[in-house]
Amino acid sequence: MNIRPFREIRRRKTKTINVGNVKIGGGNPISVQTMTNTLTSDPISTIKQIHKIQEAGADIIRVSCPDKESTEALKIIKKEIEIPLVADIHFHYQRAIEAAENGADCLRINPGNIGDEKKIKDVVSAAVANNCSIRVGVNAGSLEKDILEKYKEPCPEALVESALRNVRILEDQDFNNLKISVKSSDIFLSISAYKQLSEKTEYPLHLGITEAGGFISGSIKSSIGMGKLLLAGIGDTIRVSLSDDPVEEVKIGNEILKSLNLRNRGVKIISCPSCARQAFKVIDTVKILEEKLSHIKEPVTLSVIGCVVNGPGEAAMTDVGITGGGKGNNMLYLSGVQSEKVISEDIISKIIDKVEEKASEIRNKK
């Protein structure tokens, strides 16, 4: 069901760039990306992880390239994956050239730490020759020495000055196929830096709260920080940074966008926390459904409510809904309309069938 959101976010206008076959900025869908934590020089393990990441719903994948073995492996990796590949480069300009030549769709660099003008020019030439975009990535933990001396500590103004300085280095080489990030582990610093940067440039912005922490704390910090910016219309692609499996980063990123009605992909589950009124085991049911329905990419809404207090109202606004009833007689709703009674033991199988039917219906309309 297409329920009109209470508030529609007006996104900030930015330029459009390409990262492989994914368009970033210019009103295009906000993409979700993550980074592998395998050794890139081990292409078999890296490809295996990328396949899991892609299945979880990632649009773009980034890999670290600290050595020549890693950039050489890009040739193998690129042939075995379907999503755009970003090479993460620090300091070594030759690695950036190799990455562009070996299949990277985007380079994540800081031009200021690449080297002299000739080295930067060589990197830009390789990017242009291989249709490779660039992300200027600024982090609060690795600001230039003179900028730190000027501002005494990492602050929004320092991050923005560093970003614009690095952008100008590329613009001086007539290169503008780029996006920018200004990340910090501090939510307030990140929010302020991105807001200031958005007022000074029309390049697409890559959002992230870097080094956010473990699964729970990092997910919360990322949701607050990026959510605040996305609500303000700022951000064209996002990466959730967790000390956890990259697949979890992708899941959280997609949930952030779904919660803000910025991206409708996969099953959106509305469920109650459960209480003594529940007619079936809500928590266990939701956990199983999340796993069993994770393969669905079409935007389907599902409500799972344990009793009739809020159940009928929530079901009226979802494609598929189940509401707990007395003596195991739970009510199934389809497109907001009562359909049939379902005993508790059959809830999971019945919901899976109906959600898959709805997904197929959406798929066939495309």
Image (tube, rainbow, N blue to C red):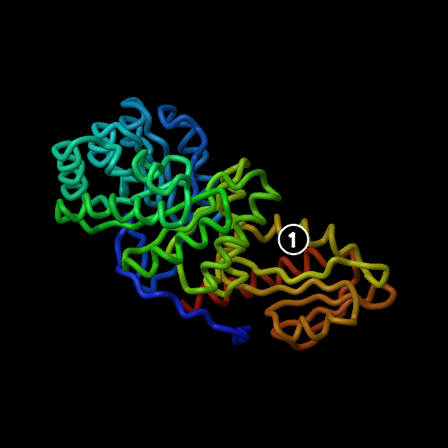
Can you give x and y, in whole percent of width and height, for residue 121 in the image? 13, 37
Along the line of sight, which residue is nearer the eye, 39 or 139?
Answer: 139
Along the line of sight, which residue is nearer the eye, 346 or 24?
Answer: 24
Q: Is residue 111 left or right of residue 137?
A: left
Along the line of sight, which residue is nearer the eye, 276 or 96?
Answer: 96
Q: Residue at x 54, y 53 (%)?
A: 223
Q: Is the residue 210 above or below the residue 269 in the image?
A: above
Question: Quarter-wise, where is residue 170 in the image?
Answer: top left
Report the amino acid beneath label 1.
Answer: Leu
Read off the residue under disc 1: 289
Give the quarter of the figure containing the N terminus.
bottom right
Q: Is the residue 218 above or below the residue 256 in the image?
A: above
Dot 1, how many residues are within 10 Å of its Cα: few (below 14), some (14-19), or many (20+)?
some
Specify whether residue 2 is in view.
Answer: no
Specify whether residue 270 is in view.
Answer: yes
Q: Residue at x 78, y 58 (%)?
A: 274
Q: Residue at x 31, y 36 (%)?
A: 144
Mark 1, secondary structure of its residue:
helix
Can you give x and y, in whole percent of width and height, for residue 58 in the image? 43, 47
